[in-house]
Image: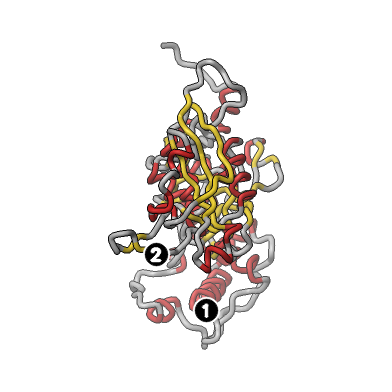
Amino acid sequence: MPVAERLTDDDLELLGELGVEIAPDQPSAHSAREQRIIAGFEEIERFVETHGRLPQHGEAHDIFERLYAVRLERLRASEECRHILMPRDSRGLLAGDAPPETALSDAALLAALGSEASAADDITRLVHVRSRTAIKAAEEIAQRSACKDFALFKPIFDNVQRQLATGERETVKYQDNALVEAGHMFILGGQKLIVAEMGELFIGDHGRPDRRLRVVYENATESDILLRSLQRALNKDKASRRITKADYGPLFSAIATEDDLPTGYIYVLRSNSADPFIVQNRAVIHKIGVTAGDVKSRIANARTDPTYLLAEVEIVATFKLANINRKKFETLLQQFFSSARLDLALQDRFGSAVKPREWFLVPLDVIEEVIERIKTNTIDQFQYDPTTANLLQT
């Protein structure tokens, strides 16, 4: 097979969309010694940019800040370091006095950190300095912080975990589809994540479009990683996966055809029990089920069946199903309303305790809305709030 002599613009664009880094790193003009000095200085610059001031000595300050303070003074005092760093010192950090006699040495600070500095340590062997490659990788991933509104996302992660277990969702290799959009979910580094928000489009490195994302992780942290950085991370992680949207199959047909195979009915029942709690809440207590046969035949012996609360029931709604796995659909409905399941124990005719599992504290109009959401394949964007008896958009 012939091999292209060079990448075309179309090739570059395609690779860029896949999040593949295509521009080779330029060889450094600095020696390893000089790179260590520059890396140490850049960490001090980041501290100043973050805190708006120079690092300071003193027990009241973080041990790393004190280490940066000592490092800056030693860089200022070294003519070799000043020669290397002056062209890149845009903030004028190298202007200052020699270190005071009371300043702690690197060795003393490292001792406080539980580390030991060898006698060979000098300014060119700055400690706690990451390589430029490591710094770039860390900046690509972006620093995570605590997700303050994680309570909004936890039900999503919990629901997705249940759907993965039941087969309503599955995971596929990320490389099969590089698309990243708001609401998409992935597994990266063994953790599930959701793309919660996407920022404004801008032109990034190599003239390619990029966005700043808000990504929330299942361990209650979040990051503002760049879109292309997330794509690169997903591509580099050989175990990364895309979590598919819930697939419920062809639940309903918009138009009936001769090929439709009737698979049953969704039915919604209301109990005529004389139990005080049921009487008080009769309008919002419903049984949701699916049957392959006639609903009226199904409830003929309700009075003697704990499944129907040992009382007569009335049919308040039915929905015809076609071309679907009715059991899977029933499971979906009952899992969606699991937070509102009726907690009631009854005794059957043999005196055994029975807890019916298909009765829920849900208004009829909400049940109808959920069925409609399933038809439009948007149910994964909602959750049921039993305290307000409403659907909430996630």
Estimate how packed mark 2 is, as few (under 14), some (14 to 19) or many (20 or more) residues with alpha carbons within 10 Å.
few
- Front residue of 371 and 151: 371
x%, y% of residue 338?
47, 55
Residue 72 vertical position relative to residue 207 in the rendered view, above or below: below
- Front residue of 199 and 123: 199
Q: How many marks?
A: 2
Q: Quadrant of the N terminus?
A: top left
Disc nearer the start of the sequence (1/2): 1
Looking at the rendering, which quadrant does residue 2 occupy? top left
- Front residue of 325 and 213: 325
> Which amino acid type is marked by label 1?
Asp
x%, y% of residue 393?
63, 52
- Please report the residue visible at 44 percent of the width from the left and 57 percent of the height from the top: 309
Residue 132 visible at all: no
- Please report the residue visible at 65 percent of the width from the left and 61 percent of the height from the top: 89
Q: From the image, tell me which residue sits under label 2.
A: 345
Q: From the image, tell me which residue sits under label 1.
A: 62
Q: Which mark, residue 222?
A: none
Determine whether the residue tagged by mark 2 lies in a helix, strand or loop: loop
Estimate how packed mark 1 is, as few (under 14), some (14 to 19) or many (20 or more) residues with alpha carbons within 10 Å.
few
> Which amino acid type is marked by label 2?
Ala
x%, y% of residue 25?
51, 40
Determine whether the residue tagged by mark 1 lies in a helix, strand or loop: loop
